[in-house]
Image (cartoon, rainbow, N blue to C red):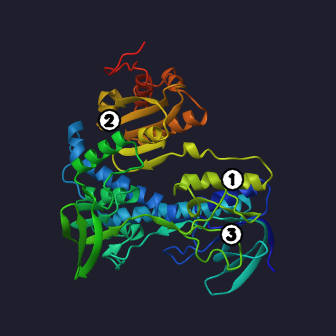
């Protein structure tokens, strides 16, 4: 029998590695099991987010956005950039370097905090034990007082479009293109599909997004979603709603995709096809037969509000449990669970988890949408301020989008904030903090914001909730 630990975490993604570090900081003997093999053939930490998700995609989004700025927008500012070109190979190498630095950084953090890194595939077995199988097939069993399952998720594959090396790829494959495809198809107009479609659209691809649903970004406030769709269409993304993919065929170096829409059966040919129809929990094989941890029909592990499973001492966090599949949600759950195991009281506010789409402009939101409030019978009042009226936005050449605040009509408490615009992902933190402290729209309206800043749009939106915006005409004047 190997060493015994106070906590063993299965998975070193943004939920798992954070849980392990926090547990060690709380004085617990902690270990973290990871099986991910990096490009150099070694086990690497960071999970999907750092290796093939959040971080590499943002590196490509930033590079492609700067390319578009240099090519099309610098001239407006008086900058003569000349003939601008993109070296895709160099862009990819930079992306890989960033990933390597960050994953290596986690290994350093484990050492600094006294977390034991265990390499291999972890499985929960009876008696609160974790069986780890290394790359050679050797198994070691570890005892633990507590186990945290943070196994993450994997892309969903669909029968009509089986993955085909180099031609039909998932989100991971889309981060490894060696050249810009002329015609790119994207199945799924969710966050991942729009981000990846944006990258290659900026670099010159003719991008068509096929979305089975009739509505665009249904989880986003309706007015913000409509504005976002309009902006992306203007940039060249051809987003076809109500387009259900029924089949595909690889013909040489091309992919022929068949889909049905309101006009019947359709067909399009692409040089590359990205399948982005969602992710599913990676729980198969993580829990041994005979261990009574309950899962639902989709493979998610049942947990309570504090991420306890039905088995005492076994917790589950992140993408393999209910809630949005977001790295920061997983991290906060990891902290909460580690604190609880250490004997402290802890909980997480699931009503104040921000979401961001890193297109340009960015789309960010937290809390309720207007349609959410209506469905719950809550009367609301809203305030919106366009970046077109912002001095800093004009100076930044970034006047697209707006900030919107939704408040309870009776109490004035902020129920949601929604932003589409430059740096929306940074600004949404104001809404998260406000909601965390139970702020009213008036609280933000009475706050002194620096001028000139993009964040002043949030201030003006708060003022607009009661018809008191200063730098735009108010729709309805209130006393």
Q: Residue at x 29, y 38 (%)?
A: 400
Residue 425 seen anywhere in this rendered image of the structure: no
Q: Position of residue 297 (x, y in %)?
A: 55, 69
Element class at badge 3: loop
Q: Earlier in the sequence, mark 3 or mark 1?
A: 3
Q: Residue at x 64, y 57 (%)?
A: 18
Give the residue at mark 3: 293
Q: Which circle marks residue 306 in the picture?
A: 1
Q: Residue at x 61, y 44 (%)?
A: 349
Give the residue at mark 2: 396
Q: Nearer the viewer, mark 3 or mark 2?
A: 3
Quadrant of the snapshot with the C terminus: top left
Q: Earlier in the sequence, mark 1 or mark 2?
A: 1
Element class at badge 2: loop
| Neighbourhood count class around disc 1 (C-alpha, 10 Å): few under 14, some 14–19, many 20 upward | some
The correct choice, above or below, for 355 with respect to 302 in the image is above
Distance between the alpha carbons at the discs numbered 1 and 2: 43 Å
Q: Nearer the viewer, mark 1 or mark 2?
A: 1
Residue 475 seen anywhere in this rendered image of the structure: yes
């Amino acid at each position: 029998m190997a060493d015994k630990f106070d906590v063993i975490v299965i998975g070193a993604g943004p939920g798992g590695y954070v849980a392990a570090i926090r547990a060690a900081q709380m004085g617990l003997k902690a270990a973290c099991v990871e099986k991910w093999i990096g490009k150099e053939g070694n086990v690497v930490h960071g999970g999907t987010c750092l290796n093939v998700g959040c971080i590499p995609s943002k590196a490509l989004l930033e590079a492609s956005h700067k390319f578009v700025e240099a090519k099309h927008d610098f001239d407006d500012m008086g900058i003569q950039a000349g003939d601008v070109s993109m070296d895709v190979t160099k862009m990819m190498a930079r992306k890989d370097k960033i990933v390597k630095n960050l994953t290596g950084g986690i290994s350093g953090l484990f050492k600094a905090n006294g977390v034991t890194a265990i390499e291999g595939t972890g499985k929960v077995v009876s008696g609160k034990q974790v069986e780890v199988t290394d790359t050679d097939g050797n198994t070691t069993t570890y005892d633990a007082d507590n186990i945290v399952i943070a196994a993450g998720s994997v892309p969903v594959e669909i029968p009509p479009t089986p993955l085909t090396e180099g031609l039909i790829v998932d989100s991971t494959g889309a981060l490894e293109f060696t050249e810009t495809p002329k015609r790119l198809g994207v199945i799924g107009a969710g966050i991942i599909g729009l981000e990846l479609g944006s990258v290659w659209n900026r670099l010159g691809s003719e991008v068509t997004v096929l979305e089975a649903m009739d509505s665009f970004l249904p989880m986003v406030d309706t007015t913000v979603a409509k504005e976002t769709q309009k902006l992306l269409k203007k940039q060249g993304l051809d987003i076809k709603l109500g387009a259900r993919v029924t089949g595909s065929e690889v013909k040489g170096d091309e992919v022929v995709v068949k889909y049905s829409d309101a006009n019947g059966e359709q067909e399009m040919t692409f040089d590359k096809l990205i399948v982005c129809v969602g992710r599913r929990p990676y729980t198969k094989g993580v829990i041994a037969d005979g261990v009574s941890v309950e899962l639902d029909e989709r493979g998610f592990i049942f947990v309570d509000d504090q991420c306890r499973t039905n088995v005492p001492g076994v917790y589950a966090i992140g993408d393999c449990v209910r809630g949005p599949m977001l790295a920061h949600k997983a991290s906060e759950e990891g902290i909460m669970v580690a604190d609880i195991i250490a004997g402290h009281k802890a909980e997480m506010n699931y009503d104040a988890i921000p979401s961001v789409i890193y297109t340009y402009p960015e789309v960010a939101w937290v809390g309720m949408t207007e349609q959410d409030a209506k469905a719950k019978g809550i009367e609301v009042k809203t305030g919106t301020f366009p970046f077109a009226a912002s001095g800093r936005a004009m100076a930044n050449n970034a006047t697209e989008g707006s900030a919107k605040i939704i408040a309870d009509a009776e109490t004035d408490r902020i129920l949601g904030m929604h932003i589409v615009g430059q740096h929306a992902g940074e600004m949404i933190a104001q809404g998260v903090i406000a909601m965390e402290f139970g702020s009213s729209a008036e609280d933000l309206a009475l706050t002194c914001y620096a001028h000139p800043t993009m964040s002043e749009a949030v201030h003006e939106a708060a003022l607009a909730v009661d018809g008191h915006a200063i730098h735009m005409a108010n729709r309805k004047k209130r006393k």
